[in-house]
Amino acid sequence: MNRVFLVRHGENPANLTREFSCRKVNYPLTDRGRLQAKQTAEWFSRVKLDEVWSSPLRRALETADQIVRFHPFSVRLLDDLREMDVGDLEGLEPREAAWELYRGVMRQWFGGHPEVPFPGGENRKSLVARFRRGLDLATQGKNGKTVLIVGHGGIFTHGVAELCGVPDQKAFLARENFNCSISELEVHRDPGLRFVLKSWASVAHLSGDAAKFVESVPETSRVSNL
């Protein structure tokens, strides 16, 4: 068994504008995001980590770079950890019409059709498979190790809900996964990959301005409201 921490990246401008961002839109952290990453790094300075992996997107990598300052190794990049690929929605102005397209795909996914993709993007099955592949690669050949992964709210939430067998997935996705939240999994590799959720989306390590969170998804577009 390996212990895996999932850390969502710190705040970036897309969280404030509610732009879709998974490949082309690639902002750095805001000042608050850097403070969130710094406080998260200080919390993990007391944890013996064996590796840190990150999505290649700037907001994730900048968060991971803060964390490894307290550890004797470099960040390992993994493209499988990118955010949920919303395809043609990325680059559109984050207006109601774009969010209605997003809601339409979510309705399909939670209406029994996870195979329906975003136009030009991926479906829920491929998203979860990509996250599973990332967890597999990050823990391959390891036993009793502690691995930290820095990534994104969408892929973490859908991936954990499915792989850990969360019974009420709509309620689970309704819970806000704030910037620089910390979650913990057990990843068992024998006889096959198995995932156990130990804690989800804690922000108890953040304080002051770092704990002033924004909601990245409009209230009307939350899965619980579809």
Image (tube, rainbow, N blue to C red):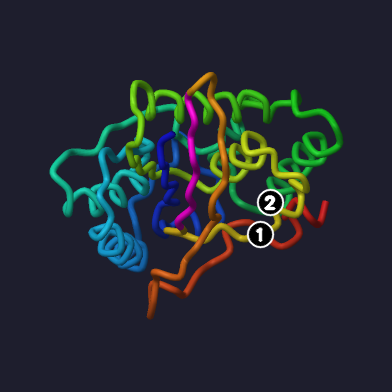
Q: Amino acid at mark 2?
A: Leu
How far across and how far down the image is residue 54, in percent?
Answer: 35, 38
Front one among 21 and 46:
46
Q: Is residue 17 visible?
A: no
Provide the major secondary structure of the magenta segment: strand
Q: Residue 44: which numbered mark, if any?
A: none
How far across and how far down the image is residue 223, in percent?
Answer: 75, 51
How far across and how far down the image is residue 34, in percent?
Answer: 30, 62
Residue identifier under label 1? 175
Residue identifier under label 2? 173
Task: Give the residue drawn at x 38%, y 44%.
Answer: 150
With respect to residue 14, does 88 lie above or below?
above
User: Is 41 inside the magenta-drawn segment?
Assistant: no
The image quadrant of residue 88 is: top right
Bounds of the magenta segment = 182-189
Q: Residue furthest bottom?
A: 208
Real-space Cα separation, disc 2 to disc 1, in angstroms: 5 Å
200 left or right, relative to 70: right
* Secondary structure of the residue carrying numbered label 2: helix
112 left or right, relative to 125: right
15 left or right, relative to 35: right
Density class for disc 1 (Cα within 10 Å; few <14, some 14-19, many ≥20) is: some
Q: Amino acid at mark 1?
A: Arg
The image quadrant of residue 76 is: top left
With respect to residue 179, does 101 lie above or below?
above
Q: Residue furthest right?
A: 111
Task: Give the residue drawn at x 29%, y 47%.
Answer: 64
User: Does the CB distance between marks 2 and 1 fall below 8 Å?
Assistant: yes
